[in-house]
Image (cartoon, rainbow, N blue to C red):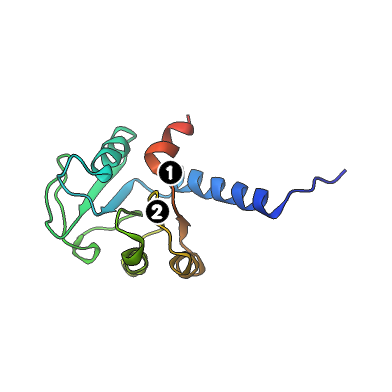
Amino acid sequence: MSVDITTSEATERSEEETVRRILTSTGDTWAIVGLSSNQERAAYGVAAVLQRFGKRIVPVHPKAETVHGEPGYASLADVPFPVDVVDVFVNSDLAGEVADQAREVGAKAVWFQLGVVDEAAYARTTDAGLDMVMDRCPAIEIPRLG
């Protein structure tokens, strides 16, 4: 007996596996590009959730502010230690450049937040062997893992 699944079902299953892999086994150091001390921004709340779930957050923002007790850096290139995941809170027009920088600094995965979509960057990033998800939020996904 064979099971037929549609292309969209296969894609969704593959994406769910990628989400699970990034959240559970890719590593615990998350550079959050666009994270500042502005408590009104989504990045601030998402960073707090990631910390609660045991992730080390690394604020990356031109202001290089300390956020949630973690020192900030002006760019990914300024971070003096390896990062596992680059979580992107910039608009879609800038996100592809951040994905390319993530690859350059040796990140293992790239996560584009809700509303951040760049299909070309997704293709470049996954072709380079990194895991990547787009238009999703780890603060929504991580509690679903149980």
Circle 2 or circle 1, nearest the eye: 2
Q: CA distance from mark 2 to mark 1?
A: 10 Å
The residue at 16%/57% (across/down) is 73
User: Which one is in front, 117 or 66?
Assistant: 117
The residue at 14%/40% (across/down) is 69
Give x and y (percent) for residue 110.
Answer: 40, 57
- Is residue 34 placed above or below 76 in the rendered structure? above
The residue at 41%/37% (across/down) is 140
Tell me the amino acid under the disc marked 1.
Leu
Tell me the amino acid under the disc marked 2.
Trp
Give x and y (percent) for residue 50.
Answer: 32, 39
Label 1, on which residue? 23
Label 2, on which residue? 111
Q: Which mark is residue 68?
A: none
Residue 1 shown left or right of residue 46 in the figure: right
The residue at 28%/53% (across/down) is 31
- Is residue 121 placed above or below 21 in the rendered structure? below
Secondary structure at numbered mark 2: strand
- Looking at this view, name the residue that lies furthest to the top: 146
Q: Are marks 2 and 1 in contact (CB under 8 Å)?
A: no
Give x and y (percent) for residue 122.
Answer: 47, 64
Badge 2 density bin: few <14, some 14–19, many ≥20, Cα 10 Å? many
Q: Quadrant of residue 44?
A: top left
Q: Quadrant of residue 143?
A: top left
Looking at marks 2 and 1 on the same chain, the residue that comes earlier in the sequence is marked by: 1
Secondary structure at numbered mark 1: helix
Badge 1 density bin: few <14, some 14–19, many ≥20, Cα 10 Å? many
